[in-house]
Amino acid sequence: MNGLTKHIKNRLFLELLCGVLCGLLVMAQVTSASACPFCSAPSLTLTEQLSQSDVAVLAQWTEAEKGTLDKAGKTVFEIKEIVRQADKDKLKVGDQITINRHRPGKKGNLFLLLGTKGTSTDWGDPIEVTETSFHYISQAPAPEEKTSKRLRYFLKFLEFPDQMISNDAYAEFANAPYEDITPLSKELPREKIRKWIVDPETPVTRLGLYGLLLGLCGQESDVAFMEKKINEPTKEFRLGIDGVISGYLLLTGADGLDKIDQTKFVPKDVAFSETYAAMQALRFMWTYGDERISKDRLRQSMRLLLDRPELTDLVVADLARWNDWSVLNRLMEMYGTGDYDIPSIKRAIVRYLLVASKGKNKKGVGPDAATSEKAKQLLDKLRKEDPKTVRSAERFFFLK
């Protein structure tokens, strides 16, 4: 496989992966850029659905009728408990509610009915519950409560036997900003988290969160445990391993990053997805690591990935964002040569030069005057030698 074919194959994989993850984020309607970076979640948690409803009742399924071409189906419920309604509403225990669509069930099955008020109540899809899951929902802290306080409640229900409850508790963590998870570090169930990480029954979508949590509460004895998980032989994509690597780096700092360099970055035969996951962990530590690993040390590891052409365009963009101007000469040596003779890489290098040519910003961040001047000269050179690529790179370049 030649360099271009390999690059295209891996880029297609990366685009597919990003598409899947972005789709999960859209489904999750994540509104905070700082929500758990390694998690996926359903559209709305149960407490969010409850808080957005004007009316909420616990009801028993009574009967249902399927629809026909001429007539809509219907389902009848009997109210067992009123959770929420406006003072002017007249609902009471024992009343019947008829929803104009068919919902199969058995007599006595419990459902949570949520409605919004207009000229009449518009009932949403009935949510089947048990007595346990209903109490879980009704007793949960409201979304208006402080997030870290709410998470202490949901922490008890991670991997709860009732899947509806455990899924929802996970979703609460998935939607929570990372900075609201960290105050729980001393309360996290360390031994349980270790078991969840290796339990084949644990949904793989939760592995990233659990790896991160173990990094927050782990001890020295957990280092070897995490290394074993990180270094499991694989050629397949492992969902959540980026979260495990991030947790490992939180726990081990620069010493752990030395090992990640040697196991994920330096070897050329490591699966692309594993290297990319470790790269994601670098980005996590840059944003959330609170100097657990110095910025210079993180830059050092990111520079190693310039040797991976399938990642080079992403690496160059990160190095520019991280104000690493030490590779300017190296990038020009790479430009248009061998496995680096790929449009996306050349555009990334041009954009790196564009950022460097602007010098320091208003906050004093950026390259020194000599580096900025050199970048301008190199840009002028490329405008003469490869004007098409420079125009393409400048077309969608926006410097904030």
Image (cartoon, rainbow, N blue to C red):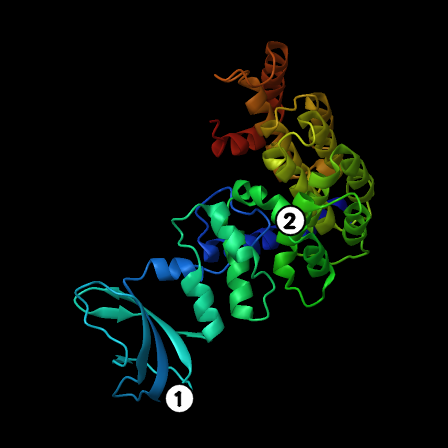
On screen, 98 above or below 260? below
The circle drawn on residue 107 is 1
Quick check: 347 left or right of 221? left
| Image spot of residue 244 (x, y percent) | 69, 49
Tag of residue 213:
2
Number of other residues with Cα within 10 Å of mark 2, as a class: few under 14, some 14 to 19, many 20 or more: many
Of residues 172 and 283, the one nearer the viewer is: 172
Q: Is residue 117 left or right of residue 301?
A: left
Closer to the camera, 41 or 370?
41
Query: Residue at image x 69%, y 60%?
Result: 196
Q: Residues within 10 Å of mark 1 (few under 14, many from 20)?
A: few
Q: Which residue is painted at 52% across and 59% down in the image?
A: 169
**320 sits left or right of 122 in the view:** right
- Residue at image coords 47%, 58%: 27
Tell me which corner region of the image, top left, top right, bottom left or bottom right, holds residue 157.
Answer: bottom right
Where residue 286 appears, as percent x and y from the top left, is 63, 33
Checking the image for residue 134, the label placed there is none
Residue 125 appears in the figure: no
On screen, residue 225 above or below 169? above
Q: Which kind of residue does numbered mark 1 sit on?
A: Lys
Badge 1 or badge 2: first in the primary sequence: 1
Q: What amino acid is at disc 2?
A: Leu
Residue 127 image position (x, y, % from top left) = 41, 72
In the displayed structure, would residue 6 be above or below residue 386?
A: below
**Residue shown at 47%/16% (left/top)?**
362
